[in-house]
Amino acid sequence: MKKKINALQEYEETTTKQMQVVYLHDNGFSIEEIAKYTKYAASTIKRYISKFKSLLDKAKNTFYHITQKVKSITQAGKQLVYLFKFYGADDELICSKVGTTIRLPETRLREEINYYRKHDIPVERAEICSVIDCGDLPAEGAESYTRAYYIKKFPGNFKKNDRFFNVDIKTRTFNKLVNEYLAETA
């Protein structure tokens, strides 16, 4: 099986960029957001959306799955704690990851996907499940709080760098834990 690639980065190859346009558009990305990754003018993107819609099925098999949540996150520069999930073939969960970033979560997700590729972990799909702004507090506090909870609950599944293999961390529980931590420090 051919390895999938990330739709949220810049490519040189024309057909890949054309697929990227129709794929991102199909996933609800705006013309401006698509331009950020393809470097195409808005008029070119609008033309390509209809001209290359026949490439959508191929694009879905080429790119990692992108959730709607990714497109709406524009919080770079803030103290963010996140929950990502990574899936393999047949949509099998590989791991859940809690972490922090001050960059765009999609940038952090790209780095994680590249890490998995480098370490031959067969990720087929990645998902941003939750991103919470910690305000003036360092996001590492919320990360440590949630990580401690999950290490206690799933000690044998924890691997360094805040990954929990074969553990489906529920978004609702993650959000509850982060909000508990933030409320306790308020």
Image (spheres, rainbow, N blue to C red):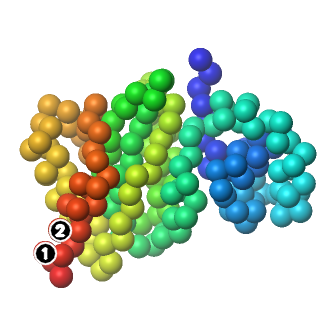
Closer to the camera in the image, 144 or 186? 186
In this rendered view, identify the residue nearer to me: 46 or 107. Answer: 46
The answer to whether one can see residue 39 in this image is: yes
Image position of 37 with respect to 66: above or below: below
**Residue 99, horizontal then vertical, whole percent:** 32, 54
- Which image quadrant: the C terminus? bottom left
Above or below residue 73? Residue 97 is: above
Residue 181 falls in image quadrant: bottom left
- In the picture, measured across the screen, residue 80 lies left or right of residue 146, that is right
- Circles 2 and 1 in contact, beta carbons < 8 Å: yes
Number of numbered labels in the structure image: 2
Quarter of the N terminus within the rendering: top right
Q: Write the residue at 85% across / 58% down.
A: 46
Crowd class of label 1 (few under 14; some 14 to 19; many from 20; radius 10 Å): few
Can residue 36 be seen here? The reply is no
**Marker disc for residue 184:** 1
Residue name at image x 30 percent, y 80 percent? 136
Answer left or right for 21 relative to 166: right
Outermost residue to the top: 1
- Identify the element where label 2 is drawn: helix
Q: Residues within 10 Å of mark 2 (few under 14, many from 20)?
A: some
Q: CA distance from mark 2 to mark 1?
A: 6 Å
| Residue positioned 83% across, 50% down in the render | 49
Question: Which residue is rendered at x = 20% and y = 33% of the image?
Answer: 157
Amino acid at dot 1: Glu
Marking on residue 180? 2
The x and y percentages for residue 140 are 25, 63
The percent position of residue 100, horizontal first and vertical second, equals 34, 59
Q: Amino acid at mark 2?
A: Glu
Snapshot quadrant of residue 121: top left
| Residue 163 in the image, given as x and y percentages of width and height | 28, 41
Mark carried by residue 138: none
